[in-house]
Amino acid sequence: MSNYSDPRADTSLKLCEHCDAVFRRIRLDPGERAYCPRCGTELYRNNDRRYGALLPVVLASLIVFICCNAFPIVTMEIQGVSTRTTVWGAVRVLALEDMLSVSTLVFVTTMLMPLVELGLLAYLLVPLWLGRIPAGFGPVVRLIRLGRPWGMIEVFMLGIVASLVKLSAMATVIPGVALWAFGALTVLLAVVVSFDPADLWEHAEAIEAGYPPAAQERP
Ligand SMILES: [Zn+2]
């Protein structure tokens, strides 16, 4: 077994990022925060309530993501025929029209990275919600943090804007379900990336200690 099987080992001590003092962690009640007594920097907080809200946001994002890609977003002229196509169809046409770099940018920023981040978060959050720790918990948390610079909302927006500008020369954007869904997904992803995946360690620690997060909630 790897050392990831014991999340407590990773979270039992907390280093102050400002003055390097080391503290032993204590359990906080929902909404409470711990501060460094030496320099006043916030050390950690109890995010159980916020994480309770994260799973519905991630699931909503996945549903909206499907809408973004299931409905046509542009009307294009392909071999003399006017065709309505989805983002994936547009990516393929851009690649075929010798715009491989734009095609790759659009694919990675608007399809691949959001799907990877949302999929990995759902993989972690659904079992945690059920009170168990999914296999490969530690590596998946690290993978999400590693991918964050590419899953950032600015990059996502850049991908959408680049695709719409490039496509406007050869296609007409349809102000329909897919375009509205992209707007909604932008807002939802902004909420998702405001969570630090490293805080999930606390969640896993509570489950290992036999305190499922839901049981800690107080009225
Ligand atoms: Zn400090």
Image (cartoon, helix red, strand yellow):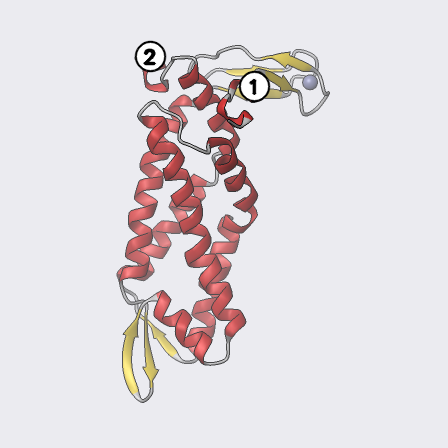
**How many C-alpha atoms fall within 10 Å of the one at disc 2: few (<14), some, or many (≥20)?**
few
- The vertical placement of 153 against 26, above or below, is below
In the image, residue 75 sits, relative to residue 59, either above or below, namely below
Instruction: For the C terminus, give its image quadrant.
Output: top left
Residues at marks 1 and 2, CA–CA distance in whole angstroms: 27 Å
Mark found first going from the N terminus, 1 or 2: 1
The picture places residue 112, in percent across and down from the top left corner, at: 44, 55
Q: Position of residue 1 (x, y in %)?
A: 51, 26
Residue ID at (43%, 17%):
208
Q: Residue furthest front?
A: 1
- In which quadrant of the rendered view does residue 66 lie? bottom left
Give left or right: position of 76 versus 138.
left
| Residue 19 position in % (x across, y down) | 73, 20
Callout 1: helix, strand or loop? helix
Looking at the picture, which amino acid does disc 2 mark? Arg
Residue 218's label in the rendered image is: 2
Q: Is residue 120 left or right of residue 149?
A: left
What SS does tag 2 mark? loop
Q: Which mark is residue 137?
A: none
Classify mark 1 as within 8 Å of ligand 1 or not, answering yes or no: no
- Residue drawn where x is 72% and y is 20% of the image: 20
Q: Residue at x 31, y 89 (%)?
A: 80
Q: Amino acid at mark 1?
A: Ala
155 w.r.t. 86: above or below: above
Q: In the picture shown, does residue 81 fall above or below 61?
A: below
Q: Nearer the viewer, mark 1 or mark 2?
A: 1
For disc 1, the marked residue is 9
Q: Looking at the picture, how far across and down is residue 142, in whole percent?
A: 54, 37
Marks counted in the figure total 2
